[in-house]
Amino acid sequence: MIAVLAAGALLRFLLAESTGLGVDESYAVAVARQWSLSYFDHPPLHFWLAGALAKLAHSESGEVVRFPFVVCFAATTWLMYRLGARFFGEHAGALAALLLNISAVFSVTTGGWVLPDGPLMLFMLASAAVIADILFEGVSTVAPSRTSARPGPSRMLRGPDTFRWMVAGVFAGLAMLSKYHGVFVLAGTFLFLLTSAPHRKWLARPGPYLGALVALAMFTPVLAWNRAHGWASFAFQGSRAAGQGGLHFDSMLASIAGQAAYVLPWIWVPLVVVLWGALRTGPRDAARWFLACLGIGPIAAFTLVALRGEAGLPHWQAPGYLMLFPILGAAVASRVERGDALTRRWLRWSAWSFIVLVVILATQTANGWMERVAPSLFAKGDPTTDLISWRELRPTLDARRMLAHGEFLAAPSWIQAGQAALGAGPDVPVLCLCVDPHHFYYMNDDRTFLGRDAVFVKKIKPNDDVVATYAPYFESFEVADTLVIHRAGAEAVRVGIYRAHGFRKVFPTTQPR
């Protein structure tokens, strides 16, 4: 178990140092410069973490801002071991932790990127672990075997039941402060209490309700920010789930394929199999049913959303799959203990395949070798260029003295505004001149910049007439320079730089202020 923790943390620290921040990460670090009760896209916790560490370290480098998220996933790995060991024995817990660490969406993005998923997973598991200790205290859920005969770890938290329910509520509240998905830990718990006869007695006790109230109280910063800004975040996230109307089975199948790809198909299929087994057995196997109740919500909800025509993002279901790893760890441990050679080979193959995939990602990001070897794979563009930093932007602007007279920075999308903001540094205000500027809209009131000069930056695309599109918003608008960002000697990204004098018209947007 210690080896899994150490190897995983080391791998993620190396990736944090060797790869640039992705577009979502750059955006998060940029908007986190300004503290807010909540943010347009997500609740505030991951913004607070990134912003606080950047200010403490006086640096926005990848290894600095990603550090708390690497630590979060190390703690998540430990909690996965504890939860698996609590239910199914130490061998099962260790295998659950290992499998979590060789699943792409968990180990790579959740495991170390500046995203809300890292703290979300940590605090969902922490809440689940405390609730499991309450509900299953004094109940042996570990089947005797050669490797799991020893009891699982002692309970996570000691104290009166009501107090422990409130602590579980604190963790659930922190999960909800990370991402709206955090509510599923409350929903899953109440589903379990409703459907498991031996545990239904808790519905007549104050503990679960006090825990839910604590979680809601911790969520009040998000409610307060939304109330002050026309419920903008709820409207935005709700619109993503609204879909196009009717039934779109192609979108649902695309969503399922995306889930399999993100988790990795050879791990996703066994997770689905153990979920199906837990659903078939139902409350008769209380431990598996508890985990299935926690996991089924995100998986079912966002897969059904895709049926409405919005495939969504494949990691939306990930918090549900997270809860299934202890069940998978138990199934794998049982097969390994029986001497199943096929399962052992699958484990080895899964681990090595993950390592190979990480090496491919890191080296492709560094030098783009795959694009030269198989250019047809990148006919629609190379997604790894999103991990290329724009840090050469500030030296280029300083060399041309383009920020010498108090100019602000402008960009045509929230994605490029985040990359430009990170490249220019925290002392340059940034406006996003687009219909959906996301949280940039709330950082600065565009109207206060009327009359000022700007530097406009935009990634160059074929047949893109930037001057014709953005000149109406300034007194004058002209090409100044082109920033060419290379990797390993090959051109990777071209960014157009424009002088824009006299900002005269605010770009229209539908976001409420």
Image (spheres, rainbow, N blue to C red):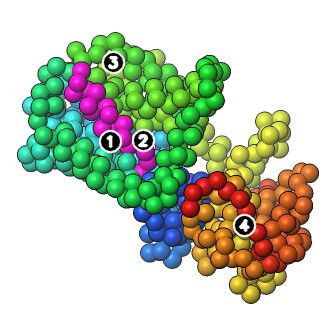
Q: CA distance from mark 2 to mark 4?
A: 35 Å
Residue 506: mark in rendering: 4
In primary-sequence order, the first of circles 1 and 4 is 1
Q: Is residue 12 placed above or below 338 in the rendered structure?
A: below
Of tags 1 and 2, which is closer to the observer? 2
Q: Is residue 157 magenta?
A: no
Q: Amino acid at mark 2?
A: His
Q: Amino acid at mark 3?
A: Ala
- Label 1 packing within 10 angstroms: few (<14), some (14-19), many (20+): many
In primary-sequence order, the first of circles 2 and 4 is 2
Looking at the image, which residue is at 43% across and 56% down?
227
Q: Is residue 4 left or right of residue 198?
A: right
Task: Tell me residue 385's x, y (percent).
Answer: 72, 52
Image quadrant of residue 246? top right
Q: CA distance from mark 1 to mark 4?
A: 45 Å
Can I make out residue 366 in this image? no
**Label 1–label 3 contact, CB within 8 A:** no
Q: Residues in magenta?
A: 178-195
Looking at the image, which residue is at 80% across and 40% down?
380
Of tags 4 and 3, which is closer to the observer? 4
- Which residue is label 1 attached to? 125
Can I make out residue 110 in this image? yes
Q: Main secondary structure of the magenta part?
A: helix
State the residue in front, 482 or 513: 513
Q: Is residue 188 magenta?
A: yes
Of tags 1 and 4, which is closer to the observer? 4
In primary-sequence order, the first of circles 4 and 3 is 3
Task: Tell me residue 444's x, y (percent).
Answer: 60, 71
Q: Quadrant of the N terminus?
A: top left
Looking at the image, which residue is at 74% across and 87% down?
405
Q: Secondary structure at mark 1?
A: helix
